[in-house]
Amino acid sequence: IVDEGPVKSWHKSVCRYCGTGCGVMLGMNKDKLVRVRGDQEAHNKGVICIKGSMLDSLMKDPNRLKTPKIKKDGKFVEASWEEAMSLMTSKFKEALNDHGPESIGFYGSGQLLIEESYTANKLFKAGFSSNNVDGNPRLCMASAAVGYTQTFGKDEPPGAYEDIDHAETFFLIGSNAYECHPPLWERIMLRKKANKNVKIIVVDPRKTKTAEHADIFLPVLPGKDMLLLNSMCSVMSELELLDDDFIAKHVSFNDGNKKISLEEYKKFLKDYRPEKVADELGITPREIREVAYQFAKSKATMSLWTMGINQRVQGVFLNNTLNSLHLITGQICRPGATPLSLTGQSNACGGVRDTGSLAHLLPNGRLVANGTHRQEMEKLWKVPEGTIAPKPGRHALAMFDGMVKDVVKTALIMCTNPAQSLPNNRYYREGMEKAFLVVAEIFEDTETAKFADVLLPAALYIEKEGVYGQTERRYQIIEKLRDPVGEARSDFDILVDFANRMGQGNLITYKTPNECWDEYRNISKASKYDFSGITYDRLKKERGIQWPCPSEDHPGTVRRYIKGDPFADKHVNANHKVHFYGKPDGRAVVFARPYKAGVEDVSEDKPLFLTTGRVISQWHTGTMTYRISELKHSAGPGRFVFHPQDAGLNNVKKGDKIEVESSRGKMQGIVDISDHETPGVVFGAFYDAKFLVNNVVSDDHDPISKEPDYKVTAIKVKKV
Ligand code: SF4
């Protein structure tokens, strides 16, 4: 730890890493970040995790990329910004002229600032007529976004973190909040301490640290939890636990193609009676009944989930059904009663979902495939009708597959590391090798930077200014507190420069993040995602504001679809307290979603499940946290972790070298053993670039959201 002197001034900011979006106080000594602590006035009430508390170590790293580089004969050589940007521009122009808009792409990140994602999205979709704009949020929350949109007609959650303080039952499924969202977990534990009726239910194939604290832990087998959710609905129907009044006023039913009646929905559920599915889930019928009863009868039930549900071939159906559990029991739109999907990245919600920076989206919930939405955006962006291409672009996997197939020739990658994070990794790396890649990065040694033809040094965190939007629709500002290192530039400045060089100066007319934000917040007025009342000035004074927020004197909206939500206000009254305004009839949709067995199932040939995830001291691909020695030491190197029983059956012990084989290939790794794993399930975390577990992870994906399934890969192992 390098002591860089005392704190001269404290500044409010937001943690750089995860979607919890913790408020932090940054202690600066001139241009040096010397201390970090949680902000008592922020939603996280002063609590931050080990990663956030070491943001100063990240900012002190001496190995930052400081100058642009161009690859020549396989080696990077330093270049001027002029040389690097000229080469980038000529390659994009060449691809556009010779092969059209579908030959270029932008692959962004839920860590870019809102102003950066918005600018890239506008530039590619309205400037180049290319919808090939996607990014790593496709890998983490695309299924949640589609799930909300299908159920409520609008993306983003109805509830907020504040609901934790009112809930009586917590239903955590596919979420290791203890390790991945520690301040939220601490808030749950405080709630439990304050109220002896609080119950925590955890559903997970692994006995995670979260599961250790559960009142009820259901270790269901990987890939089967759709059976559990439908079975819970079936118990609720069978035991008459449905909220008939809420259903009559606010819910409609659908089988995926057409409206159905409540009776038809109940008939669908009969196939999921606990006795029919419990064996396949690896639990007992009684456990399913107990959990269903607790969920329905609790005074307020809050569901929390993350990648265990989203990163699945049935990710959208799982999200729909989680929302349905709340709708059929009326456990929604009251304090403490809500579904709340947790996000992995700091700005995946605000920066990517809300700005529409995915291949099928346009800003504020609009869809590329919808002609009216395209026309609305063309008007707002002041481009001729027909500029935005009508066909959705390439989602993440398709973008890199397009490179493998030599269809996507040139791409800009910002603030993300697909060469480590994509599943079936070796295959998509072939594409990165073939295409002309411009990579904006903070370090030169990331797996993706190695594939760059042009490497651009990017500003990091407080070296630039802009807005982050976290899980609960809260926008918070990061103010610039020091200049970028060396010649680094913000991704925003790079994009504005690129736009001008590509002849799009008339489209990208703003020059600063604040001007960009003003344009973006003003166009949000035309939608029910209205946050036009959130200005930079307000963000600097207030501790984050939750949208909708339609005017500068509006306080923001904690819970949606009820009184206080500006779009619900005129519809709600004493008898009718909820209005799902995303749907023309004001009713949220309960979908009858059948369970479908995945392609990746265990067999005699591949008898184990491989599942992947995070550990508390590391964040995502570790490009920022694995270089901090204390955090690296805490996590150790990446390993294949076995339950002792499986280790015995496979004749391996801690430290052994093994070969793991899946349908996607083979890799070698070292064995670790822990009784936190479940028999039949092997765990591999993905933070360590030297342990590239994604080499063997399947790239099967949800057919609707296109989010890959990182949680269920069938494998066999042998000792090397
Ligand atoms: Fe940062 Fe997430 Fe940790 Fe909060 S929980 S301090 S946002 S990494």
Image: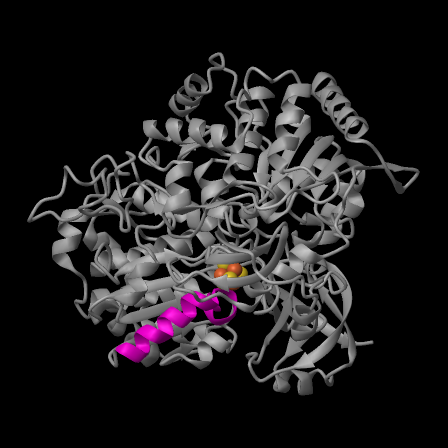
Q: Is residue 503 left or right of residue 63?
A: left
Q: Quadrant of the C terminus?
A: bottom right
Q: Is residue 182 magenta?
A: yes
List x then y, in percent, for residue 101.
64, 23
> Which residue extends farthest left?
574
Between residue 529 and residue 581, name the one nearer to us.
529
Please state the extent of the stretch shown in magenta in the rendering. Answer: 175-194
Q: Residue at left 72%, top 46%?
A: 428
List x then y, in percent, for residue 23.
45, 56
Residue 359 visible in this rendered orientation of the protein: no
Q: Residue at left 42%, top 37%?
A: 536
Looking at the picture, the colour scheme in use is one colour
User: Image quarter for residue 502?
Assistant: top right
Residue 509 visible in this rendered orientation of the protein: yes
Q: Is residue 551 left or right of residue 671?
A: left
Between residue 40 and residue 474, name the one nearer to us.
40
Q: Is residue 124 above or below residue 6?
A: above
Q: Residue at left 23%, top 60%?
A: 335
Between residue 2 and residue 185, name the one nearer to us.
2
Q: Is residue 104 left or right of residue 579?
A: right
> Which residue extends farthest top?
384
